[in-house]
Image (spheres, coloured by chain):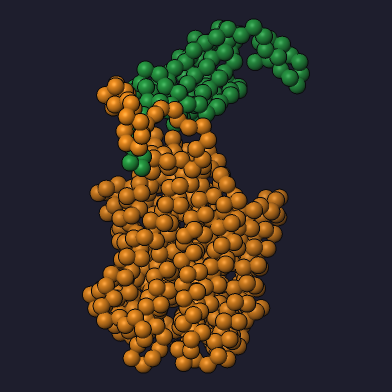
Amino acid sequence: MKLVTAIIKPHQLDEVKEALEAFGIQGMTISEAQGYGRQRGHSEVYRGAEYTVDFVPKTRLEVLVDDMDATSVVDVVLKAAQTGRIGDGKVWVTPVEEVARVRTGERGVEAI
Amino acid sequence: MDGYYAFMLVATALVLMMTVPALALFYGGMTRSRSVLNMMMMSYGAFGIGAIVFVLWGWSMGWGGAGNGQLIGNPFEMFGLSGVSWHSTADGTGSPYVGVLFQLTFATITAALISGAIADRVKFSSWMVFVPLWLTLCYFPIAHNTWGGGFIYSHLSQQDYAGGTVVHINAGIAGGVLALIIGRRRNWPKEPMKPHNLTLTMAGAGLLWFGWYGFNVGSVVLAGDTAEASTAQFMSETGFTFMNTTLATCAAMLGWLLVERLMHGKATSLGAASGIVAGLVAITPACGAVGLAGAIAIGAITGAVCAWAVGLKFKFGLDDSLDVVGVHLVGGLLGTILIGFFSTDVAPGGVNGLFYGGGFESLINQTGAALFTMVWTGVFTAIIAYAIKFTIGWRVSEDEEVEGIDYNEHGESAYELAGRGGRMTTAAAPTPSRPSAESLDLEGAK
């Protein structure tokens, strides 16, 4: 099993969610995040002072998938989240040792 | 009468409070958390620019050429209040400056009311261009027609004490037309866009109710009294209007909650706040026209109908975000037209409606004035809206809309909980050893 984590632009969330649902993904977790990558932040002026702002609002999306689906899910996220502009985000895959569904106690792939 | 002058000063300040902060709070709580400052700024901005244009040419367009029966007044007749006395008119009736200020607060809140229909998606600069244009082409003419001796005033003896047509139908139809032309928010109605802070909305609704005593009672006093009016007349008018305003509002809140409970299973705080405003809207034109039973009936009917009407936008696909059409247009129409049924000569207005043996005359007058307002303002609002759409544009970009209009339009967020990192690079940093802009590699940061 794999955990696919994606950091995307907040306004792409809807497209990504729909694309994942169309692919057959049945659940996901999202959270509001802040961060920067190669783009860095930007500078802005507020009330007479200039600031650099490092962290940009992002959405973090996590999906648990079967091993064989991981590459395809990454592709789905890439396709839906891509605008071609700076700050589109990143997707990565990490191995998962065990998954259990709390209600039924199912383990492994059954619990995804 | 000194009491007249003192009361009108208080009433004027109460109506000012309805725009800043009451309406700003009421609307601000109903938006999403990333749009609350922008929503509040639309009310504050409307007051700022509306007050200036009102004094420059609004009073002249609305109240100039009294009794001329024309569609609009001449904006240059009393431009900048030239020729308006600040102490009293020649015949000793009232104080013009306080009268001007009282009407000024009505113009500004009417413009601010429209903002609820286009929440979350409009450039602040475009809104600030829209407000003076709309006041000039829609508000001042309708006010002139209804209160300034204009066409409706001369041809239809409708009763509109505090602005059922001038304020609520006017703002309601304008909000509907704008929402139609500007378009929906991204992902509406697929994504539920629920109010982010209903405590603000409840506080705003309560403050609106408080301010509305100045709005309604002040209007009846301004229209009916002179500085020489007797204390008995003053007391009967103010008492009647206070009582009607209270009863209709309570009945509307209860009516709204009841319909909500029956249709959707729960009585909500948003329903109570909206019911309060719907009742106040409906009793606005009728506060001096109906008796106590009429006030309760108008309130209850309006609360119930509006509770149902706010769901219609989903059927029509119209993103009237904070229900300006459902509450102000529907409530304004009900209040204005129900006068035709419930008006009684016991009230200060002294006109009998259909239910009090007065026949259809009042109903025809009320309906005619409502239709006139809808057609006039509908057409001119559309013209202004398209003019802005094809020149400076209305909408912020989609990215900005989703990421938050507060941050992108105003550089702020209402709830700065986590901070955004970074550091100050110029000014305000007191130590001489502060890093220079160059050392921070600002070029690379962009």
* The one of A21 and B103 positioned closer to us in this rendering: B103
**Residue occupying the point 30% across, 58% down:** B383
Where's residue B86, x and y in %? 34, 81
* The one of B76 and B188 positioned closer to us in this rendering: B76
Quadrant position of residue B261: bottom right
* The one of A64 and B47 positioned closer to us in this rendering: B47
Chain A visual colour? green
Question: In the current view of this chain or complex, which residue is farthest to the front?
Answer: B432
Question: In the current view of this chain or complex, which residue is farthest to the right?
Answer: A104
Where's residue B234, x and y in %? 54, 87
In the rendered image, what is the letter of the chain coloured orange? Answer: B
**Residue occupying the point 46% across, 44% down:** B35
Work out whether B107 lies above or below B182. Answer: below
Where's residue B435, x and y in %? 32, 25
- Residue B302 in view (yes/no): no
Quadrant, the C terminus of chain B: top left
**Could you tell whether B243 is left or right of A77 in the image?**
right
**Residue occupying the point 65% across, 15% down:** A112
**Could you tell whether B302 is left or right of B32 in the image?**
right
Where's residue B391, x and y in %? 25, 49
- Residue A68 in view (yes/no): yes
